[in-house]
Amino acid sequence: MSLGFDFAQVATATMVLFAVIDILGSVPLIIEIRKKAGEIFPMKATMVSLLIMVAFLFLGESILKIIGINVNAFAVAGSFVLFLMGIEMILGVRLFREEEGNAKAASIVPLAFPIIAGAGTMTTILSLRAEFEAINIIIAIVINSLFVYMVLRLTNRIERLLGPGGLIVLRKVFGIICLALAVKLFSSNIKELFV
């Protein structure tokens, strides 16, 4: 199809971003932020995170060129981050620490950034850029943003529906997806660094 649209790429990128953003796994954290801030604004948080992700998709590579790093090298580095994030999800350990933001701006910091559009998401977007067409990644970002919006709107209901056990199982499943993508990214980009 035109513009390089590929359903398989969209599906893969959507699942990978879903695993990395891990909005369902962040439900307890979102509830905590809501308690501290008094209120969060789902549309505002969703739109800001979407803009950050799309901007990084197009500007991230230029930023890398300025500092002399190619996308393949970034994808290999990203594969390590994804691998560690997968380990976090599967083993239930905490390897990455996020700084707490000001409660008054909770819909932007820390909700939109770094919880939704954090370092792991940015790394993943650029890593996907090394493999997939931009249009397919944009569609995946939009699909995930719609899902993020629904989760932010229905946080309390989702927590009751899934329960603690359901959230844990979900995190572990998407942890395995992260590990698989990390291996794929590493194996398909490492050889490009030595040609």
Image (spheres, rainbow, N blue to C red):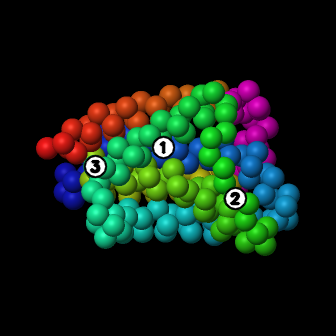
Q: Residue furthest left?
A: 195
Q: Is residue 156 magenta?
A: yes
Check disc 2 and report the residue beneath it: 99
Instruction: Tell me which residue sits at (27%, 57%) in the image.
Output: 70
Instruction: Tell me which residue sits at (56%, 31%) in the image.
Output: 87
Q: Earlier in the sequence, mark 3 or mark 1?
A: 3
Q: Earlier in the sequence, mark 3 or mark 2?
A: 3
Instruction: Tell me which residue sits at (67%, 66%) in the image.
Output: 109
Badge 3 amino acid: Asn
Check disc 3 and report the residue beneath it: 72
Is residue 121 in sight in this rendering? yes
Q: Is residue 132 above or below residue 108?
A: above
Check disc 1 and report the residue beneath it: 81
Q: Nearer the viewer, residue 28 or 83?
A: 83
Q: Is disc 2 placed on a helix, strand or loop?
A: loop
Magenta residues (range): 153-168
Label 1 vs label 2: CA separation? 18 Å
Q: Is residue 87 above or below residue 150?
A: above
Q: Earlier in the sequence, mark 1 or mark 2?
A: 1
Where is residue 169? Give x, y as percent.
Answer: 64, 27
